[in-house]
Amino acid sequence: AHAAKTVNVAAPNGNPAYIVNTDHGPEGYYGELINKIDHDLPQYKFKTTFTSQNAVFSGLQSGKYDVALNNSWYNKQRFQTYYHTQAVGLDDLRLVYRKNGKKANSLDEVAKKNLKLVPISTDDARYSVLQDYNNSHSKKINLKAIGDQSSADALAQVANGKYDVALYPYAAYKQVANSKNGKKLTASKSIDQRSAYLLVHKSSQNKKLTKDLNKEIKKLYNDGYLEKLTK
């Protein structure tokens, strides 16, 4: 038998709702998913490295990494730059604000009330959601860019009153809901839903890898594994 081909996987730090770096390797939703894929596809050996969100993307572009585990949503430019798998999850987007602070139940309210929104890294898919909103509305959301920031730190800035509101998938809010800061916060109803994909570095070898990943993801979807994982 041929030796297994090593696939270099990049995962972002500071995103515990989706993936966690442990002594036993990656855990959490994407950790379990990549371990399952690794187990089911013996022709590949998936090797995961944790790094900053920005480094995940620069490494994926340069080919240092083959696959990114950072819960990526559709973005035209991104889908042109990389191969992508079929959807591996669905994100339920919420606005998170202080229980006794200014309420926000829609992006329109964030814009109209001129609420202070926690800045977002331009590499983050949430940034393009808000950019799209601003491009199509005259009353704009105050959108500021920032470098890397963990979801816990961002939500802490809402809890302590530095900002009024943050935009996050419900899973990220649930992760902190019972913490000291989290108890001061509440989440709006769903304001949007986005499918999440794995992004793959574009190369002739990775064309085959993307096909194999898709076959496996389809199988995991059909046999209920993906749904079980979200619980």
Image (cartoon, rainbow, N blue to C red):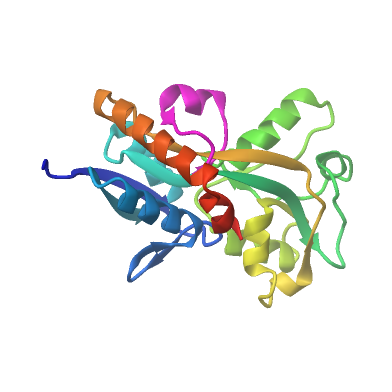
Q: Residue furthest bottom?
A: 180
- Image position of 138 (left or right of 117): right
Query: What segment is highlighted magenta in the picture?
Result: 71-88
Q: Is residue 104 magenta?
A: no
Q: Would residue 51 be visible to someone looking at this image? A: no
- Quadrant where the C terminus sits is bottom right
* 89 vs 164, nearest the viewer: 89
- Answer with the quarter of the image where residue 36 lies: bottom left
Question: What's the residue at 28%, 45% (across, down)?
Answer: 8
Residue 98 placed where, x, y %?
80, 64
Q: Is residue 78 magenta?
A: yes
As drawn, is 145 to the left or to the right of 165? left
Q: How many marks?
A: 0
Residue beneath the point at 86% across and 63% down? 101
Residue 168: x and y in percent read 67, 51
Q: Is residue 99 above or below residue 46?
A: below
Observer-nearest of 123 and 74: 74
Q: Position of residue 68 (x, y in %)?
A: 40, 43
Front residue of 103/199: it is 199
Which quarter of the image is occupied by the N terminus?
top left
In percent of width and height, residue 213 lies at 38, 37
Q: Nearer the viewer, residue 27 or 70?
A: 27
- Residue depicted at x 64% and y 68%: 176
Residue 78 appears anywhere in the view: yes
Q: Residue at x 31, y 38 (%)?
A: 66
